[in-house]
Image (tube, rainbow, N blue to C red):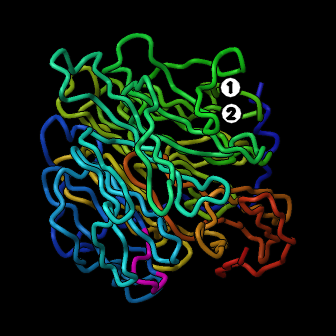
Amino acid sequence: MRLAFALAILPLAAQADPSFTVRPDAFPVEHVYSGGWEHFVGGGVAVLDCNGDTRPDIAAAGGETPARLFVNATEGPGGAIRFTEGQMSDLTGVTGLYPLDIDGNGILDLVVLRVGANLLLKGDGDCGFRDASAEWGFDGGTAWSTAFSATWEGEAQLPTLAIGNYVDRTDSDGPFGACDDNALYRPKGTGYGAPRPIAPGWCALSMLISDWQRSGTPELRISNDRHYYLTGGYEEMWRLSPLEPRTEADGWKKVSLWGMGIASADITGDGLPEVMLTSMGDQLLQFNDGKTWENAPYEVGTAAQRPYQGDDGRPSTGWHAEFGDVDNDGRLDLFIAKGNVDQMPSNAMHDPNNLLMQTADGRFTEAGAAAGIADDARSRGAALADFDGDGRLDLVVSARRAPLRLWQNTSPAGNWLKVQPAMDGPNTQAVGAWIELRAGPVRQAREITVGGGHAGGQAGSIHFGLGDATSAQIRVIWPDGRKGAWKTVPANTFHAPQG
């Protein structure tokens, strides 16, 4: 049993309750993720520095509304967070966006998921993007795409791309039982070859490629929505080479849920990443022993199965999940975006977002209302990121048929560290690297991945909370397995190790 994980979590100095201040004027225009049933899902946000000024910017899916780019114009640490509107092509049908340096030139590009042809947008380093799909030999298809992950394999000059698709809209017998196949794109020459199907598909809503065993061999996890696959489907884990699914014979325990989002991080201090799967009803945390997965006991506090305020006792609906140390106490906390699919009568209509704070014994307690982020719009995508540069993680949340909103973290918080490994091309963002940190009794390990969440992700520095520690030791284990030397660095600073 992994319930003993609590013994591995050593307490740092206690912090006050977290607090956030909503910034209603953060965005220059109201942006809404809108649309009919094809946009019941999706609505992600991408967080990236698109102009090299070290301030995170935001690209937001719009559904039937055009996607928008918001460029960070916050004046400085602690200043009111605000954005200006950037230039983005008039892209509609967008369900999600993920930042990724596709061509290895050190400038972030965007993978755009759509109802229709997906796109690869090439960044110009000044928050400009153009469609480079044809240039890179990428066939975006015509599916309803809702999930994404990526990694580098071997000496490839381009990343391997995994795209998850939802219901096959062309199936006349659908939508129930009409889940579409997923697709894997591998480099071929200077571009991409024809996509290889990942079949059968079970209506994917989140994907994550992660080296969950710390073996040097990443694998693809897929979270699926049982609402449409009805029978026979389950959560999946695929080996990439050869491309084949894990089975019960080699330790994969089948779980079926209304899978909507994936978050992965080491929360026990043993160096292995746990995984959080959002769903309708219980949210499922699984512990990782390096060989298989074990469902967390209810007492851990992450089920978040019903609204924690109001009188609506129907089950919650979870979407984007993300681990982050909100109060910088050295323990990862957990944000979950919540919201009804639309008017689903079986589930809560007033379903506030969760902010689950990890306590010294490794359990999680709800702080959404106390922190001021208990919005009960139909939330979808989200991101925890330090938008004002003060060392505290702020929060942006996208919602279906409600405006994009931003909350600034005003919590009393401990010390922090930001680490952003970098490499020469092609894998300039060091995707697949692990950052290990030691600060007093605390051990943390974070993997650089692309994917997960719900329809959106981040590229940039990895944020660590340090509590009262005034320094930390860090090292990077690079994607090829090379181990960097331990280096002592002062708290409240940024570091960019070069591999």
Taken as a whole, is the magenta stretch helix, strand or loop? loop
Report the residue that reaches farthest toward the bottom.
75
Is 125 situated left or right of 209 in this image?
left
Q: Quadrant of residue 22?
A: bottom left
Q: Residues within 10 Å of mark 2 (few under 14, many from 20)?
A: many
Q: CA distance from mark 2 to mark 1?
A: 5 Å
Q: Secondary structure at mark 1?
A: strand
Span of residues in magenta: 48-54
Q: Is residue 34 left or right of residue 393?
A: left
Q: Which residue is mark 2?
A: 287
Relative placement, left or right, of 86 versus 396 is left
What number is the disc on residue 294? Answer: 1
Callout 2: SS? strand
**Rendered residue at 76%/30% (across/down):** 291
Disc 2 to disc 1: CB gap under 8 Å: yes
Nearer the observer, 483 or 353: 483
Residue at x 42%, y 28% (from the top left corner): 224
Judge by depth and name the residue closer to the eye, 62 or 302: 62
Of all residues shown, which one is farthest toward the front? 189
Residue 409 visible somewhere in the drawing: yes
> Considering only vertical position in the picture, is 211 above or below 152?
above
* Nearest to N terminus: mark 2 or mark 1: 2
Asked if 444 appears above or below 430 in the picture, the reply is above
At a point 83% along the width and 77% down the height, the residue shown is 488
Residue 435 occupies quadrant: bottom right
Q: Residue 416: x and y, percent? A: 65, 72
Q: Closest to the observer: 271 or 3?
A: 271
Q: Residue 415: say if magenta.
A: no
Tell me what residue is drawn at x 87 percent, y 72 percent: 485
